[in-house]
Image (cartoon, grey):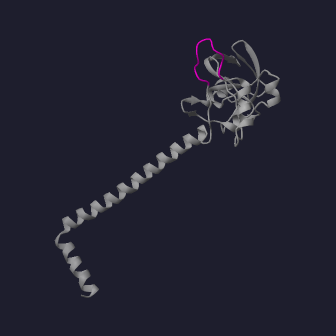
Amino acid sequence: MKFQKILRIAWEGLMLNKVRSFLTTLGVIIGVASVIVMMSISAGAEAAIAEQINSLGANLLIVSPMRGVPGAARTLLYEDAFAISEQVIGISGVSAEQAPAPQTVKANGTTLESISIVGTTADFPAVRDYAVAEGTYFTEAENDRKLKVAVLGAGLAKDLFGEESPLGQSITVGSTKLTVIGVMQTKGVVADIDYDGRVYLP
């Protein structure tokens, strides 16, 4: 049977069953569109999850102290962080972190309550994939000297100083006066941690 004849028979069949042909075509279109939409949603969700994981640190290992027997010695010390880096192969950076109780922060005539305070070491930005936007992060030497300096999260810096640069400005954390030396890039909330609303100290 010639191709032209096959084409003519098919066309006549379509014309005799216009409604059925329309519904069949519509079903195919809807089916293809649904598959495309689902694939797009899946790809978007996968990208969002990957971004969250990368923000947290895809190659990050967090070591926390165990809750021991009451009255027993603490299970992790400041020196332990650096002992780990010396004894475990493949570690590119170590950051010791300690989060005391939230404090009142005052600066530029503004008072903010219950602000998260995080004591860290110099490798914190590299370990957490968290860059400085303005100024600098404190160095290991500054950390060892326990200088009264602070680095602010982007959101906290704006809340305290608005559009004015915080660099060189003084803030009071609790009863301690500190000098701002840096502001971190915007990072947002990752794993329920608001990085932009914290004060980072040596």
On the question of residue 83 being in view, the answer is yes
At horizontal 54% and vertical 45% (from top left) the residue drawn is 50
Task: Tell me where residue 17 sits by quadrant.
Answer: bottom left
Residue furthest to the bottom in view is 2
The range drawn in magenta is: 65-75
Q: Is residue 42 above or below residue 107?
A: below
Q: How many marks?
A: 0
Is residue 70 highlighted in magenta?
yes
Residue 90: % across, % down: 70, 43
Residue 91: % across, % down: 70, 40
Pick the residue in front: 99 or 163: 99
Pick the residue in front: 77 or 133: 77
Our reading of the magenta stretch's main secondary structure is loop
At horizontal 40% and vertical 53% (from top left) the residue drawn is 37
Q: Is residue 123 above or below residue 41?
A: above
Q: Is residue 199 above or below residue 18?
A: above
Residue 195: % across, % down: 62, 30
Q: Is residue 200 above or below residue 47?
A: above
Pick the residue in front: 111 or 102: 102
State which quarter of the image contains the N terminus: bottom left
State which quarter of the image contains the C terminus: top right
Task: Tell me where residue 99 sits by quadrant.
Answer: top right
Q: Is residue 46 left or right of residue 127?
A: left
Pick the residue in front: 20 or 176: 176
On the question of residue 133 being in view, the answer is no
At horizontal 21% and vertical 80% (from top left) the residue drawn is 9
Q: Is residue 197 left or right of residue 36?
A: right
Task: Tell me where residue 76 sits by quadrant.
Answer: top right
Residue 77: % across, % down: 70, 23
